[in-house]
Structure formats: C-alpha cells, structure tokens
Image: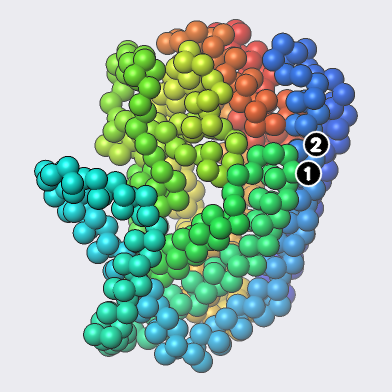
Amino acid sequence: MAESYQFIFIFLLILTTAVEFYLGHRQKNFVLKNKKKVPSAFTKIIKLADHKKAADYTVSKINFNSVELIFGAIILYLFTLGGGINFMNNIISNNFDRSLEFYSLILGTTLVICIFFIVKFFVAKFIKQSSSIFQKAVKQANARKKTIFLLFVLVALSIFTACGVINEIYNFLNSHFDDELINGAFVITSVFVVLHLIGVPSSIFHTFGIETKYGFNKVTPKLFLEDQIKYLFLLILLSVIFSFAALWILSELETNWWLWLWTFLSISLIAVAAILPDLARIFDTYTPLEDKTLKNKIEKLLKKCGFKSSGLFIKNGSLRSTHGNAFFGGFGKTKKIIFFDTLLEKLNNKEIEAVIAHELGHFKRNHVKKLLLIQVILFFLIFYSFGGLKDNQAFYNGLGIDISSNTNFLILLMLVLIPFVMFFVGPFFSRLQRKYEFEADEYACEFTKSSDLKQSLIKLYRDNASTLTPDPLYSAFYHSHPPASIRIQAIDKS
Ligand SMILES: [Zn+2]
C-alpha cells in the first residue's frame, strides 16, 4: 500500500510542476509574440515603450517563477521522502526544553508588546485632554516611535527575565499542557519557519532584482529586514497557537475530530478575514483620507450606494513599491475601503470615484462572503475525503514519514494534500473571481461614468506594467482578473 501512496505522490508532484511550467512557457511565448504592437484599444494611453516594458517585466517574472517552481518541488521532495519532516521531529523532541524556553521568550515578548500598546492607548487618551506642552512632547516622541518601541520592549523583557516572568511562563506551559501537544506545535511551527527561511533568498531576488530593475521597488534593505523580523514573529506566534489548538482537537475529540477541526478552521478563517485590515497595520500605515473635495465626492457616492463602513483609508504603499491598487477589506463592522497612496497620485478624482464604485460593487454583490463560503465548503470536502488518512500508516510511509502522528498528519495536510487539491480547484476559483470582476465593473458603471472606469483601468495596467496580451490558457488558469481587452469590451457594452 505504501508504494501506491508513494507513486500517487510522485506522480502528482511531477504533474503539477510540469503543468505550471508549461503554462509559464506558453505565457512567455505569447507575450513576446505580441510585444511589438500595442493592441488597438489601448493606443491612446499606452505607448509602445510602456507595452514593451510590460512584456519584459512579465517575462522576467515568469522566468523567475519557473526556477522557483522546480526549486519548490525539490524542497517538498526533501521534506517528505528526503526525510526532512522526520529530521525536524527528532531535533525538536531531543531539544524539547530548549524549544520550550525559546517559545516562552516569544510569548513573553508578545505580552510586552501588548502592554506597550495598552499603555500607548491610555497615554494618548490622557494627552488629548492635557495641556499643549504635553502635546508638543508627544509629537516629538512620535517621530522616534520605533526607537521608543524597541527600547520599551528591551527594557520590559529584561525586567521580565530578571523577575522570573519568563520562567513562570515556561513552568506554566510545562505543567499545564501535555508534552506531546506542545512538542507537536513546535514541530509544525519549526517546519514552517524553516520553509519560510528557505524562501528568503528568493524574495530578496524578487524585491531587489526584478522589482528594482523595472523601477517598482522602494524597499530599502533596512525595511526588508524589519518586515522579515515582524513576519517571522507573527508566523511563529500564530502557528504555535493554531497548531496547538488543532492538535488538541485531534487528540481530545477523537470521534468526529475532522468535523471539529473543520469548524475550528472555518471560524478562524472568517475571523482572520474580518481583522485582516487591522492585522495589516503591523506592516502598513493607514491614514484617513484628507483631501476635502475628494472626500465629499466619495461620501456622496457611498451614500448613493447605501454603504456604511468604518471608513476610507489610504495605505502607504509607496513605502514599498510604486505598484498601485485599491481593495476592500474585512466585513460587517470592520469593513474598510483601502486605497494605495500610489494610486491616489496617478488617478484624477473622477477615476478614483470609479475605482471605489467598483470596490463597492464587490461588497454589494457579497463577493467577499461568497468566496469565503466556498473556501469553507472546500475545507469540509477536504477533511471529509482525506480524514481517513490520519490513521493510515501506509500513507505516512509512502510519503517517507516514519511515525504516524497527529503532528505529521497536520504537516502533510498543509504541505501536500491542500496544495494538491488547490491546484485542481484553483482554475475554477480564478474563473469565479473573474466573473465577480465583471459584476463589479457593471455595478461601477451604474453609479459612475464608464469612460472614467475604463481610463482608470488602463492607467492601472500601464503603471503596474501588467501585460495587455496574456496567453488565454495561462490567464484562464491563474488570473483573478479578466484580460484587459475583454474587460474593456464588457464595460463598453454596459
Ligand atoms: Zn475588483
């Protein structure tokens, strides 16, 4: 039996890699073939030089992706049949105490950061009611926000360590929770941390190689490092919490564990989607829109469309790149329209209104909710279909894993099963998203001028160097947005 699983695994690994490689190859050829001439619908706004740049940019990205694809397949092979997951299991189990010390420190740091923000919140409240001398001091302090934050964390951590708080966390974890659960959460987290670290050189090349070459990159090495540290911290924290909870469900709720795990994941998925705009603040700054004329216009539009939100925010996208975008985040009371500052500079007020009307279309037609619901249903089907593999020793052995355990099952679920399913489901997802784009465009045309929407879209394609001539098959497989020409045609008709 183990041989059958091994055969299926290797077959799917080669198949998915080969298909993606082939699609990339097609895209490259198609774009190069159409490089010499701007499609007639775009000649007014897009110059030949822009068109050529978009082609070169697309080809560079495809070349890079092809290398990453092969590399990714090799890494997956090394982690499974190559013995990587076994190795991680052994190394964490043999160094359990050290791992626990490390994670206690991470939890302690989280506690310190939370305290910092609580203090900051109350200080801000107090300052608002106090004298102007205070307010001036705060303004000066704000300029050195990062230094103050780091100092606070370092000092508080030293005090925590000296007073034995970190030790207390260690003892608490050690005495209140099952060793196996903690160990499992560490193994899962370590696997994902290692996978992330393996990918760092590739993101360095993407940011400082390709993006810089085409003039999009604004990330400095310092900012890159800061982002990486924040990301890693967040990854460790969330992974430990989520895997611990998932492992607890697997071990405590043995019958129907998959139903419980599915419920837990669905709730988490929805919760994360709801707080995503707030979570993103760890990396970006959102400021309320200040331009009064524009603000009035947008508020009128929102009223006309019957939209209530916690506001319209400008994201400091220009800190990282010159790419521009607008999106709609969260739902219910947390919903926000987020606009990149880079986009604000490039579009005129009417075009901005059209883009916002498009985003409102997504909201009014419940696109975010529908996509979430489909994901939840998909997870149900995945758990229902593959739950039986959890106690199937042959499955583990076929994939090169020595021990069948809840921990290893969760790792294989996230590393192998879900990605394979997503490969086959992805094109349907993309198709649905493209349908939603048409619907949102249609909505925008009801409330704003279609010529403004068209103009803004073409500008977006131009300034992001998105190709106007994607390969139809590539586009059908991957793209969440319809090709520019088809989208413009649809707007013309409505
Ligand atoms: Zn859209």
Numbered disc total: 2
Q: Amino acid at mark 2?
A: Asp
Residue 441 visible in rendering: no
For label 1, the residue is 60
Q: Secondary structure at mark 1?
A: helix
Q: Counting other residues with Cα less than 10 Å from the Cα at mark 2, is it few (<14), some (14-19), or many (20 or more)?
A: some
Q: In terms of image quadrants, where is residue 400?
A: bottom right
Q: Amino acid at mark 1?
A: Ser
**Residue at x 21%, y 52% (from the top left corner):** 121
The percent coordinates of residue 203 (x first, y second) are 65, 56
Give the colouring mode of the picture.
rainbow
Q: Counting other residues with Cα less than 10 Å from the Cα at mark 1, is it few (<14), some (14-19), or many (20 or more)?
A: some
For label 2, the residue is 56
Q: Secondary structure at mark 2?
A: helix
Furthest residue in direction front, as rendered: 133
| Quadrant holding the N terminus | bottom right
**Residue at x 35%, y 26% (from the top left corner):** 290
**Residue at x 49%, y 26% (from the top left corner):** 344
* Above or below 12: residue 378: above
The percent coordinates of residue 384 (x first, y second) are 47, 58
Circles 2 and 1 in contact, beta carbons < 8 Å: yes
The percent coordinates of residue 477 (x first, y second) are 68, 38
Residue 228 visible in rendering: yes
* Above or below 158: residue 27: above
* Above or below 258: residue 338: above
* Above or below 232: residue 46: above
Q: Is residue 154 left or right of residue 317?
A: left
**Cα–Cα span, label 2 and label 1:** 6 Å
Q: In terms of image quadrants, where is residue 252?
A: bottom left
Nearer to me, 142 or 2: 142
The percent coordinates of residue 47 (x first, y second) are 76, 19
